[in-house]
Amino acid sequence: MKNIVLGQYLPGQGFFYRMDPRTKIIGVIALMVAIFLLETIPQLLIALAIGVVCMLLGRLSIKRIAKGMRPLFILLIFTFFFQILFNKEGSILLQETLTISLASIGAIIALTILWRLLAKLRRFRFLLLLGYLAGVYFSLAYLAYGYTFASFVFTVYERGVEMSVFVVIRLLVIITLSTILTLTTKPTDLTQGLESLMRPLKVIGIRSDEFALIISISLRYIPTILDEANKIMAAQASRGADFLQGRLKDKIRQIISLLVPMFIIAFKRSEDLADAMETRNFIPGMKRTRISELAFGKTDILATLFIVSSLAASIVLRVL
Amino acid sequence: MSHIDIRDMSFTYTGKRMILKDINLQIEQGEWVAILGHNGSGKSTLAKTLVGLLEPAQGTVAIAGTIITPETTPAIRKQIGIVFQNPDNQFVGVTVRDDIAFGMENLCVSREEMLERIAFFAKKVGMEKYLDKEPASLSGGQKQRVAIAGILAMQTGIMIFDEATSMLDPYAREDLMKYIRQLHQEGLTIIMITHEIEEALLADRLVIMKEGKIFADGRKEELLKQPEVFAQSALVMPLALQMAMQLDDEATFGEVKAFLWESTFAK
């Protein structure tokens, strides 16, 4: 439990790391707007290419970014198929009668078994899933032997393919943008950047500095509390508690037996922490100086220029 | 006028049972005082009234001539700092640097000054190489040293250690005591709350608490001449001290052996 890394932050060098978190936050928002203004696939591909060039210049490993985006692949695949299945504009590209027959059901079962057997090869997980889906499609389309349960017509339209590619690339670019932000900015810097950007909200009574303090204390205590949870779990396991097996009801009971002491300890901790903060002269709402300082440097000026010109370019493309 | 001046002070949480009763205690500048007592004797409560976390029901607590009231606590806390028992529960910052800075930020010290003081006091407690480290990667003793640096950086003249070593291993404990001794030599007023006699005996003066009252108060050399004081307040003398007090200079090896046997196994 030592040295827990919070969020996706990956220490490194390069200009993304030197940038002020405020520039990065505003940049990501502005560039997202710019991406949403683009209307054709070539435009998006150019944006993606520029993004990749930036990542290379910033010495970011594309492999690492792709890894960070992995949980979102499901979303991409879902979007892709959603568009293909439900967009019914333009000319027909492909029309196939899919049949659920004895032969195709047999083939699908065999494929499923094979797929699960190969699931150990985690590196090719994505390829295997694609192969599995393709296999299911082909067995539905061509293995219409034996008793037929049902059959339906599967049609792919030109516009559907276009839109699905478009939406997937757009999502890819947007996810890449936010991944770059979280990968190159420490959670604390991110909080501080947000605090600084929210400072004008003081007018309507939102105290951004206290908000930032709350976030940074929460971040600071996550490893401590995880450590505690592990200790309590070990203590309970040594007395026969089993957090993994048993029926759902038993599992819920186990979790409650973990949560109750966790809460009690957390309250005790927060009481102690409040005492410690108070005796070090912390008074909520009072003016304080700050040790960490955000600095707007040369890199930020260049980045701002880049962001403004990209936004302007996409506005021009949209209007023309 | 004493540096710390407690007069006829009583404290209660509920209004019925008094946790502290008629405390009168004067501590001079530069003194090293150990407040000794077993669990429930009120020693930690006393510490909390000294830093204005708890308000006395009767009587007054004054630091450098100013009586602690809700209005004066911010000013009082510039002069008195406290290190608590649990190293984890008092670490506010995300890194060592942030944590040392926390108190100074509250005092509105300028950033340049803060960086200077952090460099100076981190070095003093031997944590200068850890400034960018997160608390999860530090040991308990290191966290306590960071807490000390954070209070030193606020430049309070008085430092309270509320069982600050009780959650540390023996080495870290010894290490911390070394720093406390050094602070005392530099002129800080040190108040150490503890239930361990060995630790308390490092101080010059002992205040023994029992059932919310001050049971004994004096220089350690004088109090050690009255072992019954310790026994009556349920404090166990370290073996070496018991031996030194009960055996005379001409004790034979057999007498030493008999003594050790009796005190270890025959209880």
Image (cartoon, coloured by chain):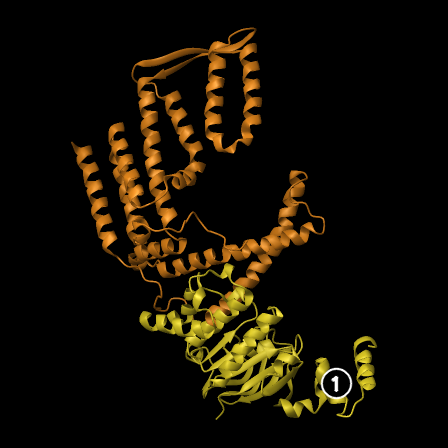
Residue located at (25% from left, 56% from top):
A297
Measuring from the top left, give residue B182's x and y in whole percent: 50, 81
Chain in orange on the image: A
> Considering depth in this image, is B260 or A22 the residue closer to the camera?
B260
x and y percent of residue B22 in the render? Answer: 60, 86
Q: Looking at this view, is A100 or B20 the one in front?
A: A100
Q: Chain of mark 1?
A: B
Q: Quadrant of the C terminus of chain B?
A: bottom right
Q: Position of residue A313 (x, y in %)?
A: 19, 38
- Residue in the picture at 46% in, 64% down: B92
Mark 1 neighbour density, 10 Å: few (under 14) some (14–19) many (20 or more): some
The residue at the far left in this view is A320
State left or right for residue A62 relative to residue A229: left
**Residue A33 vertical placement versus B216 (above, below):** above
Residue A215 occupies quadrant: bottom left
Check disc 1 and report its element: helix, strand or loop.
Answer: helix
Name the outermost residue toward the top: A146
Q: Is residue B245 above or below residue A181?
A: below
Query: Residue beneath label 1, please?
Result: B243
Which chain corresponds to the colour yellow?
A: B
